[in-house]
Amino acid sequence: MQTVTNPAAAAAGLRGARSGTGDRAPRLGMTMWFNVVVPDLDRGSGTTSLGYWSACSGLEVQLTPEGPFISGGDYGTPQYLPGQVTYNKVVLQRAMTAQGTRMVRQWLEAQTKQWADGKGAAERQHQSVTVEMRSGLGLQDAVIHRWVLKAAIPVAWAAPPLTTKGGDVALESLTLVHSGFLDSAEAAADCRLTLTEETLATNQLAFLYNPMKISLSKSRETESKHTQLHKEPPVVDPNSLKISLGELRLEGCREVAAGVKYLTRWLDLEPATGRSAIAPATAEGKPPVCDACEQRLPSPKDPSAGGSPRVLVLRWGQAREILPEKVLLKSFDVEFTRFTPAGEPSRATVKLVLQEHRSWAGARPAGSSARGPVSIGRQRAPVARGSGARPDDSLRGGIGGRP
């Protein structure tokens, strides 16, 4: 701590800091002089909509890197990579007054109504809360620093215990969570992960938040028991890319209902179009096969065979270089996690398994014929119409039973 040896000079410096006339002494921020502003609650009454508060804590930010990572051969230099930015809860405290406490209660009631209305994120109001630290209470006192808490949400309000002992001043506390007060890189408007039906662009599903993790898997399987009949083992799996997406969010009653509708539609096989209800058999007497997934189409011998899977367009910002543009839906899981007072689902968590849609024209695996790969000693079982999977999917690893 620095020792002040000239009290008169120190007093002059403080006077300069308060009045702003000092050339060298800066204005000092005072921890006991600050106010909290909620613009939507201001109603033209100035800039102190939630009034002045006597205490404010939690104005903190943590930049948490991932690591440490140890490189082989270098065991004395830990390495760190960028991680998550997190903000603490902000807790406000002050003596209770009739007007100030009433304004806080009105804000809390407006928030609780929004929590139960089942509207989507785009329709919900997100308001900022501003905390200003000043150099004093006078009109000439400057704002030293300002924290704008983005999308602030009140999560707790408390009054003190009421008792006849002590006779202390009643202090109320208000706790807020927020999306930060630092200006950081924001995602572009078109960077949400979306799935769109290729032949019907109005059927589109956009998720509220992008996934934290995406799993890609690709493998090739062979029938080793037939190696004596072939120079090379015939390919069983077409080596299509599988994409697993977890923890996708749907928010709002309309969004959840539309999401379930589209996912169910996309998993069902699409009946053949542009041909008769029962397609004729091929010249070899075999039932016709869909060019997209090699699923058998309806035929006189097997009218229960399904149609073609619906092709979806997958988009997520600049990830197009990694993720395939066209995919097929292999499976989905939807878990409803929130409901309106009337029992309507208003929030859901979705898990998807997609598979790359590949065109087989002129690019078939080795050992496959024009209508499919060589399969010795195996016959296909009938597939029910509307089923999203074919027999031996667990062995083939493909969506819609693509061999």
Image (spheres, rainbow, N blue to C red):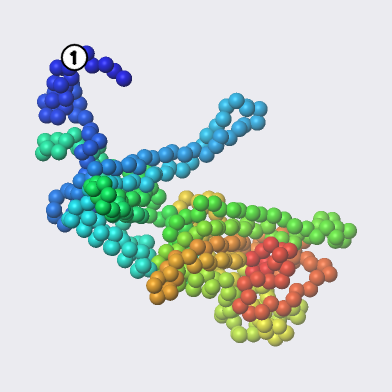
In this view, the residue in front, 6 or 88, is 6
Q: Is residue 161 left or right of residue 219?
A: left
Quadrant where the C terminus is found in the figure: bottom right
| Identity of the residue drawn at 39% across and 44% down | 87
Q: Position of residue 196 (x, y in %)?
A: 48, 65
Q: Quadrant of residue 153?
A: bottom left
| Identity of the residue drawn at 57% across and 66% down | 332
| Identity of the residue drawn at 11% across and 39% down | 139
Extreme right residue here? 228
Q: Is residue 400 left or right of residue 81?
A: right
Q: Position of residue 171 (x, y in %)?
A: 26, 49
| Identity of the residue drawn at 28% across and 54% down | 162
Relative height, residue 18 to residue 97 (above, below): above
Relative height, residue 146 to residue 294 (above, below): above
Q: Residue 121: tell me if it is visible.
A: yes
Quadrant where the N terminus is found in the figure: top left
Q: Position of residue 100 (x, y in %)?
A: 20, 53
Q: Is residue 240 left or right of residue 316?
A: right
The residue at which mark 1 appears reads as 6
In this view, the residue in front, 348 or 386, is 348
Relative height, residue 196 to residue 303 (above, below): above
